[in-house]
Image: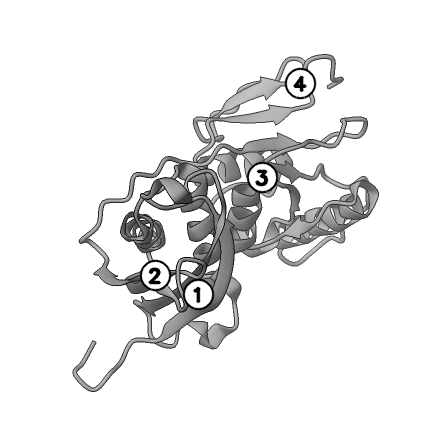
Amino acid sequence: MTVMEQADRIHLRDHVVAADIGAFQSERGRNQRLRFNLTVDLRDIGASRDDQVDSVLSYDVLIYAISAALADQRYNLVETLAEKIAAEVLDHPRAAAITVSVEKLDRGPGALGITIHRRAGRVSPDRTALPVDVILWSPGMAPPTGAAILCPPAPDLPVPQGGDQRRIALLALDQAAWALSGQLGLEIAESQTELDAAIRAGQPVIWAPTKLAADAAIPALPLHLASWLADRLGSDHVTIAATDPSPDPVLPQIALRPLPGAGA
């Protein structure tokens, strides 16, 4: 970045959450309002020009950082809470620096709090991969609960001949995903950002694969795509509706976990 260039920034302002926080005995066991203001300097200037959500740092990352920090422990100090939030956001590859302001709104006539500024590489986030189940869907399976990514089966429809057969197969799977969404009442996720948000929220979604997998060096087959997605998300297995899945050397090194009682 040159001297004349300034970083693009995203921000979350006046986000108020009630939480049990404080070092004084009078603060323990009772919620008080906290106001959060976050401003993040981004690494890539103008990354949003292609109008794709995966090109930018999603605002959901900021909201999740707050909720995850509050869920992690009870804090005596807003300073510690601010550090935790900063570390969570700066773990994102597009975040270069962050300013975090945390204010108590119920401890005096005004807002009492702290503002910190941290740059990437100067904090050490304590973070583990979020659990997610990647499921190769089959008719008759019960809708999942919790963080789960459903990969649709190939639709039983004639596929047009000619042209880019892999892209046509992916688009057919997108159609199957939207149809399954209507059947199960679950949302569609196409981008990495949407998948990440669903995993953090602990919600099941259905994956329409074309956007993410268009350029992946794998066949446009449901099991290959499910295994590729599991590997990308850090999951070590794929749940499938088959009693004896056959190994395939083309697949990533992902365990195929049969669903008990499911038919092939």
126 or 52: nearer the viewer:
126
Q: Are marks 1 and 2 in contact (CB under 8 Å)?
A: yes
Q: CA distance from mark 1 to mark 2?
A: 7 Å
Which residue is denoted by mark 1 in the rendering? 56
The answer to whether 166 appears left or right of 95 in the picture is: right
Q: Are marks 4 and 1 in contact (CB under 8 Å)?
A: no
Q: CA distance from mark 1 to mark 3?
A: 22 Å
5 or 60: nearer the viewer:
60
> Which residue is found at the position 58% from the left and 33% from the top?
134
Above or below for 46 versus 40: below
Which of the image's four quarters has the C terminus?
top right
Q: Which comes sooner in the sequence, label 3 or label 4? A: 3
Q: Are marks 3 and 4 in contact (CB under 8 Å)?
A: no
Kind of element beneath mark 4:
loop
**Badge 4: how crowded within 10 Å, few (<14), some, or many (20+)?**
some
Q: Of discs 1 and 3, which sits in the foreground?
A: 3
Amino acid type, callout 2 = Arg
Q: Which comes sooner in the sequence, label 2 or label 4? A: 2
The answer to whether 40 appears left or right of 133 in the picture is: left
Kind of element beneath mark 3:
loop
Amino acid type, callout 3 = Gly
**Residue 202 numbered tag:** 3
Kind of element beneath mark 2:
loop
**Residue 94 numbered tag:** 2
Amino acid type, callout 4 = Leu
Which residue is denoted by mark 4 in the rendering? 259
Q: Which comes sooner in the sequence, label 4 or label 1? A: 1
